[in-house]
Image: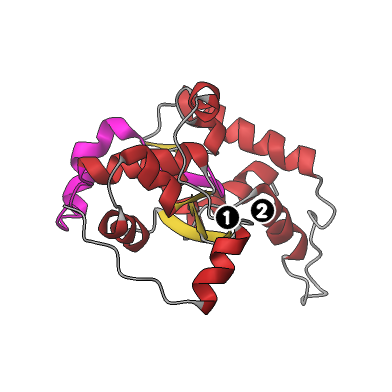
């Protein structure tokens, strides 16, 4: 049995990207309950799988197949070649999802480059509240809660999701454009409440502040 063809079959049959480890597990565990059909790939090595994947990539390019092997954030997947998109699109006539607004894109960019980040710090950069925009990004599956910041009040932290990487065709965050420059650039942050102020808010009732216009 040809290892390359077996891996090709796994990738073709999978409903999601397969990581190298998932491919190895599938190869090693195949037929484990059938003692009469020995598994010749029970001891397959990671280097052998990596070589077979590389062979498939080269093979699809050389023979100009209508599909290609794509590496995504969570593994490998067979996908149609983008140059045939106009024909493939006809098979999926579902309405396009609404595009993100400019404020949503700006907010998403700040989170992507400075994650994990609090809502207050994003608002300090943008200069406006982001409640509705942040909710939209979370509903779209692009942003998620990453925990709480270790500062007084322990506000929530936000970061991008695996879907964000997949949506923008990135394998990891290091592939963001100008990532080092923008990560290191100074940006304003929200004022940090002191621990004493946080405790006071828990024991006293403050007078309501006048509404800002």
Judge by depth and name the residue closer to the eye, 26 or 135.
135
Contact, mark 2 vs mark 1 (Cβ under 8 Å): yes
Residue 147: percent from left, percent from top = 57, 62
Residue 112: percent from left, percent from top = 46, 41
Residue 74: percent from left, percent from top = 56, 50
Q: Residues within 10 Å of mark 1 (few under 14, many from 20)?
A: some
The label number, if any, that marks residue 10 in the structure image: 1
Mark count: 2
Residue stretch rendered in magenta on the structure: 72-101
Classify residue 83 as left or right of residue 99.
Answer: right
| Residue at 40 percent of width and 45 percent of height | 122
Judge by depth and name the residue closer to the eye, 107 or 44.
107
Q: Quadrant of residue 137?
A: bottom left
| Residue at 38 percent of width and 58 percent of height | 141
Q: Quadrant of residue 2?
A: top right
**Whole-number angstrom distance, CA of label 2 to CA of label 1:** 8 Å
Classify residue 212 as left or right of residue 192.
Answer: left
Classify mark 2: helix, strand or loop: helix
Judge by depth and name the residue closer to the eye, 158 or 142.
158
Residue 65: percent from left, percent from top = 40, 33
- Going from N to C along the chain, the mark reached first, 2 or 1, is 1
Whether residue 153 appears in this view of the structure is no
């Amino acid at each position: 049995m040809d290892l390359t063809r077996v891996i090709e079959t796994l990738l073709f049959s999978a409903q999601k990207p397969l990581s190298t480890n998932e491919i190895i597990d599938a190869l090693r565990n195949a037929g484990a309950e059938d003692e009469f059909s020995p598994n010749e790939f029970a001891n397959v090595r990671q280097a052998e799988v990596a070589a077979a994947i590389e062979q498939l990539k080269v093979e699809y390019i050389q023979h100009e197949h209508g599909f290609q092997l794509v590496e995504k954030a969570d593994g490998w997947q067979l996908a149609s070649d983008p140059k045939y998109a106009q024909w493939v699109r006809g098979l999926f006539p579902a309405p396009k999802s609404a595009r993100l607004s400019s404020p949503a894109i700006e907010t998403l960019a700040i989170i992507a480059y400075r994650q994990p980040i609090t809502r207050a710090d994003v608002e300090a950069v943008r200069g406006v509240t982001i409640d509705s925009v942040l909710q939209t990004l979370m509903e779209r599956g692009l942003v998620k809660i990453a925990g709480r910041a270790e500062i007084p009040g322990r506000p929530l932290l936000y970061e991008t999701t695996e879907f964000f990487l997949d949506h923008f065709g990135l394998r990891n965050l290091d592939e963001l454009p100008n990532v080092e420059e923008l990560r290191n650039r100074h940006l304003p942050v929200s004022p940090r409440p002191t621990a004493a102020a946080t405790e006071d808010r828990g024991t006293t009732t403050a007078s309501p502040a006048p509404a800002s216009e």
